[in-house]
Amino acid sequence: MTGPEILIPIFAVTFGSAFVLGPLAKAIARRIENSVPKVDAELAERIANIERNVDVIAIEVEKLAEGQRFVTKLLAERERVGGVLPSRDPGSR
């Protein structure tokens, strides 16, 4: 069997397996998809609310950090110019 007789079983196995494995894979995928639990609408809303709150907190933290960088820059420039920082001791006033 070295001629065209061998091609028929090769094609049959190749394309036949696609016709068998294709629907089988689709059925398995459908079963996996249906086994995933659905997310409750209330839970999804709560998670979205948490995400918004985390974003707001991140913005506020960035504002605080920017203010800290600004104050640090001002104090560094003030010391370079030769300014004297006020004493923290309340009795020295």
Image: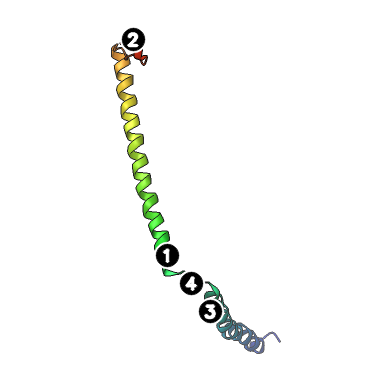
Residue contact at pointers 1 and 3, CB within 8 angstroms: no
Mark 1 against mark 2, which lies toward the viewer? 2
Q: Secondary structure at mark 3?
A: helix
Q: Which residue is mark 1?
A: 44
Q: Secondary structure at mark 1?
A: helix
Distance from Cα at disc 1 to Cα at disc 2: 59 Å
How crowded pointer 2 is (Cα within 10 Å; few <14, some 14-19, many 20+) is rated as: few
- Say whether disc 4 or disc 1 marks the residue closer to the N-terminus: 4
Type of the residue with mark 4: Lys
Type of the residue with mark 3: Arg
Q: Secondary structure at mark 2?
A: helix
Residue 92: which disc? 2
Distance from Cα at disc 1 to Cα at disc 3: 24 Å
How crowded pointer 4 is (Cα within 10 Å; few <14, some 14-19, many 20+) is rated as: few
Residue contact at pointers 1 and 2, CB within 8 angstroms: no
Percent position of residue 13, x then y: 63, 85
Q: Which residue is mark 4?
A: 38
- Say whether disc 2 or disc 3 marks the residue closer to the N-terminus: 3
Location of the C terminus (image quadrant): top left
- Residue located 65% across and 87% down the image: 9
- Say whether disc 1 or disc 2 marks the residue closer to the N-terminus: 1
The correct choice, above or below, for 43 with respect to 87 in the image is: below
Residue 30: which disc? 3
Distance from Cα at disc 2 to Cα at disc 4: 68 Å
